[in-house]
Amino acid sequence: MLFRSQRIHHLAGIIPVGGQPLDFKLPWHDCLMPISPDYLAIERAVFQCALAGCETIWIVGHLGSQPLIRKRVGDIVLDPNPLIMTKTAYQHVKEISIYYVPIHPKDRAKRDCLGWSVLYGADSAYRVSKFISKWIAPEKFFCVFPYGILPDESLEGNRILLSSQETVIYSHNGKTVKDNVHLPFTFNADDFFRCRDIVKHKQAAEWGNTSARYYDLATVFKGLDTISAAVIDLPWYHDIGSWEGYKSYMSSPQAGIYAKPKTLFKGNRRNRYQDR
């Protein structure tokens, strides 16, 4: 996977939801927690990928949780950038396809952690796209977690940087995803192979046991190159990956400031034509 131009042509968004359950202990998936009225964490993550300029979005999770997520999110989301800039938005707006990737059977109960879901989603996005055509294979991946709430401006204002060759790491209070925080980041093929090999070698050293399913983000993304990466410092950030973090966000001034962009979520592609 080589970069031959300053601006890449396919940035694939990866949203992992296939990790171990959080401490909410509710009958629905943790990514379906509301962050404002009629606005769920998974919808927020999809919208963040759209703001970042992703050409495709890949949601990676267990097969049993995908039907409800897909019913809520749908198969497409509209690009918010041309929707704002053009007057005839619905005639020229760009549709971003959403794909649902189930955890591979060989990874279930073995290494189905949140970090591995990111790597498996990136591998699936590349293989599926390259099978269709080598010209549409993603050259770079943008990972965003449903459990991280950050300002829209930090994504929409950095679309060009996120779609460039440079690796981008989001930071808050000096911490990144390598500090086990649900902050977005981009990675390329070299980062992918380093992180994948670290997980496999560590699991092999532990005699192939099931401890890999409990690897945290710091362990999986230990090989992520942050030295030469562009760092974006966030003015504020909330991690809702725990009940305490969720309570902190809901009691903060930022809670509820972002309403669901209903005009961007067009629902299921098949039903959109069947209902006419």
Image (spheres, rainbow, N blue to C red):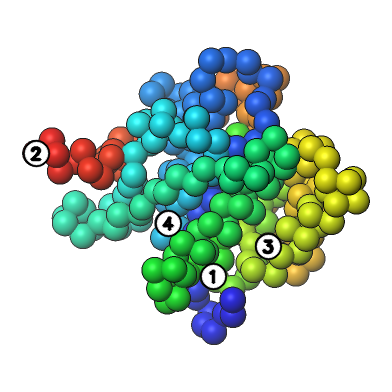
Q: Which residue is mark 3?
A: 192
* Mark 4 → mark 2, Cα distance in angstroms: 26 Å
Q: Which residue position is annotated with label 1?
A: 139
Amino acid type at circle 4 is Thr
Query: Residue 242 appears at what percent x and percent y?
Result: 68, 24
Q: Which circle's residue, 2 or 3, is located before the other in the chain?
A: 3
Q: Is residue 59 left or right of residue 55?
A: right
The amino acid pointed to by label 1 is Glu
Front position in the image: 64 or 53: 64
- Residue 104 position (above or below residue 10): above
Q: Is residue 229 left or right of residue 254?
A: right
Q: Residues within 10 Å of mark 4 (few under 14, many from 20)?
A: many
Q: Which mark is residue 276?
A: 2
Residue 22 falls in image quadrant = top right
**Of the residues shown, which amino acid type is indicated by label 3?**
Phe
Cβ atoms at labels 1 and 2 below 8 Å apart: no
CA separation in Å, label 2 and label 3: 43 Å
Q: Is residue 149 visible?
A: no
Mark 3 neighbour density, 10 Å: few (under 14) some (14–19) many (20 or more): many
**Sequence order check, earlier mark of 4 and 1:** 4
Marks 1 and 2, how far apart at CA: 37 Å
Mark seen at residue 56 = 4
> What distance separates the C-alpha of mark 4 from that of mark 1?
12 Å
Mark toward the start of the polypeptide (1 vs 3): 1
- Say which element carries label 1: loop
How many residues crowd mark 1 within 10 Å: few (<14), some (14–19), many (20+)?
A: many
